[in-house]
């Protein structure tokens, strides 16, 4: 059998392993195995590529392998679960940079050898290879600087607020125009010097554009941006695959591109916002219109009336002691206070007391997809206890108590009831339909959207103020006293 055929067969096996692994990542019970199977696919692809006769210098490959493995092991051990969005942003960025470097290196080879000598070793035409180089460099460059900026925002190395300036979109449109014009010249020109100028132009502009496109997007929207950049890193890898005629790179880039796009769409849908609103509206630049005490500054949101009714941990204990159906609704505040372990402890105490406990999970609770699932899994909350929003909402009127732990926007009834609210139409967990609602938060802080929340003022709601971990510990201690006394 020809070596080329063998290599391609091995690539097909590697790709099947990727897909199987991806499928298994969809369930918590099979996720670890899925990860291992995908890694095996990647190992196979790497080993087979190293056996390919195109690969001539193993020294640099060994250096890269050693360095990459060392960095990967350190990251896996050191990076906290809550820092995963930053980590993913960096990895996307490096994926983009790798594609950019592949495109750049191949262009260097072409300049050195000339087209005819270069094309002796690769099938293709100058126009096709140039177009692939343009795409790998342009998408890779935008992905690289965009991801680095997203990382800086999430790591709070720069302000998380959107940075807006006059004619920003015009500037971005002009940069986009220069980028594509340079790309077109690069592909069609036969003149090496003109091609070099065009290459330098689109390389520089793509790096600038990645930065300026992410600038007007607020830190809270970074997970959506990161998922989109993830998709772009896949497309860049795909383009790089065409540049060096490597089938596995082309094929592996596709699922990354599409799955990133699907995740972006799912997140936008769950927030009831369009992708263009996320990318261009500067959401979060100024606090969103508060509707407290009258119509919001947007001129429409309905007046919020009622009063906040504080409750002590001892009284919360009394309410919970009598409850038989309890739903816990975690949100971003649970992540901030790292209360997941105490939440788990309290849920066990409730169960020992005869209550049925469920965890209601909103798809965009927290600040990254699956944020709540990850935290609760870390605290060993059984997966069967997690109930998705659509499944829990019909059960809400039967719940004796809903405990809202640092969630705000995802339980804001305005999204369901108030047509004038900026978040109207965003699906929510209907905590307000439970018989009693206990909301844990530190004070009057608004959620990500900056809106006030009528839920906190409803007659059946009580506010348990303080850091969620501390207040939950106090409630749990009451149950402990009951058990020991
Ligand atoms: P949220 O609306 O951001 O509200 C979080 C609440 O937690 C705040 O009102 C805050 O009030 C409270 N809090 C903060 N620290 C706390 C602590 N230590 N102890 C107790 N409470 C604390 O959170 P959410 O309901 O989870 O909603 C998520 C929001 O993020 C949505 O608007 C969603 O669209 C957006 N978003 C999510 C994603 C994603 O992938 N998950 C991506 C992009 C955007 P106090 O300050 O008064 O304590």
Image: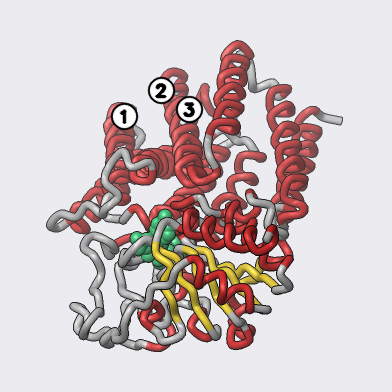
Q: Secondary structure at mark 1?
A: helix
Rendered image: mark on residue 111:
2
Residue at (60, 11) in percent of width and height: 59
Q: Categorize mark 2 by other alpha carbons within 10 Å: few (<14), some (14-19), many (20+).
A: some
Label drawn at residue 106? 3
Q: Secondary structure at mark 2?
A: helix
Residue behind label 2 places its C-beta within 8 angstroms of ligand 1 = no
Marks 2 and 3, Cα distance to the nearest angstrom?
Answer: 9 Å
Residue drawn at x 19%, y 57% as measured from the top left: 170
What x and y, as percent, mark residue 79?
53, 35
Residue 397 vs 447, above or below: the answer is below
Name the residue tied to disc 1.
Answer: 196
Report the front residue among 141 and 21.
21
Closest to the observer: 128 or 328?
Answer: 328
Can residue 269 be seen at all in this image of the molecule? no
In terms of image quadrants, where is residue 26? bottom right
Disc 1 packing (10 Å; few <14; some 14–19; many ≥20):
some
């Amino acid at each position: 059998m020809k070596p080329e055929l063998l290599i391609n067969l091995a690539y097909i096996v590697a790709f099947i392993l990727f897909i199987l692994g991806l499928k298994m990542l969809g369930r918590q019970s099979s996720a670890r195995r899925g990860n291992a199977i995908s890694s095996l696919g990647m190992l196979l692809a790497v080993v087979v590529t190293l056996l390919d006769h195109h690969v001539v210098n193993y020294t640099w490959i060994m250096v890269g392998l050693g360095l990459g493995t060392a960095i990967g092991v350190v990251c896996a051990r050191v990076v906290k679960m809550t820092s995963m969005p930053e980590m993913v942003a960096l990895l996307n960025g490096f994926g983009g940079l790798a594609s950019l470097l592949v495109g750049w290196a191949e262009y260097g080879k072409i300049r050195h050898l000339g087209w005819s000598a270069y094309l002796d070793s690769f099938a293709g035409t100058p126009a096709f290879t140039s177009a692939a180089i343009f795409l790998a460099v342009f998408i890779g460059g935008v992905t690289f600087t965009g991801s680095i900026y997203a990382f800086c925002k999430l790591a709070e190395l720069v302000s998380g607020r959107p940075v807006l300036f006059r004619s920003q979109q015009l500037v971005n449109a002009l940069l986009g125009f220069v980028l594509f014009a340079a790309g077109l010249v690069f592909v069609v020109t036969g003149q090496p010097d003109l091609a070099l100028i065009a290459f330098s132009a689109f390389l520089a502009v793509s790096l600038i554009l990645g930065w300026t496109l992410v600038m007007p997007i607020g830190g809270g929207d970074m997970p959506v941006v990161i998922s989109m950049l993830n998709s772009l890193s896949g497309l860049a890898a795909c383009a790089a695959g065409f540049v060096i005629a490597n089938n596995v790179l082309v094929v592996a880039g596709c699922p990354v591109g599409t799955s990133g796009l699907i995740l972006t769409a799912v997140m936008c849908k769950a927030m009831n916002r369009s992708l263009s609103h996320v990318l261009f509206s500067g959401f979060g630049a100024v606090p969103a219109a508060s509707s407290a005490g009258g119509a919001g500054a947007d001129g429409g949101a309905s007046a919020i009336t009622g009063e906040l009714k504080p409750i002590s941990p001892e009284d919360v204990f009394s309410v919970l002691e009598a409850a038989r159906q309890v739903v816990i609704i975690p949100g971003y505040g649970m992540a901030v206070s790292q209360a997941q372990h105490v939440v788990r402890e309290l849920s066990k105490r409730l169960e020992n007391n005869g209550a049925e406990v469920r965890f209601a999970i909103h798809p965009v609770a927290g600040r990254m997809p699956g944020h709540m699932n990850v935290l609760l899994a870390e605290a060993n909350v059984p997966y069967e206890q997690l109930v998705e929003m659509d499944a829990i909402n019909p059960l809400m009127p039967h719940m004796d108590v809903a405990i809202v732990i640092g969630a705000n926007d995802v339980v804001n009834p305005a999204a369901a009831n108030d047509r004038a609210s900026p978040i109207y139409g965003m699906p929510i967990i209907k905590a307000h339909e439970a018989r009693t609602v206990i909301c844990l938060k530190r004070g009057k802080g608004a959620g990500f959207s900056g809106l006030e929340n009528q839920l906190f003022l409803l007659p059946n709601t009580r506010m348990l103020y303080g850091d969620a971990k501390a207040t939950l510990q106090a409630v749990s201690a009451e149950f402990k006293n009951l058990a020991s006394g």
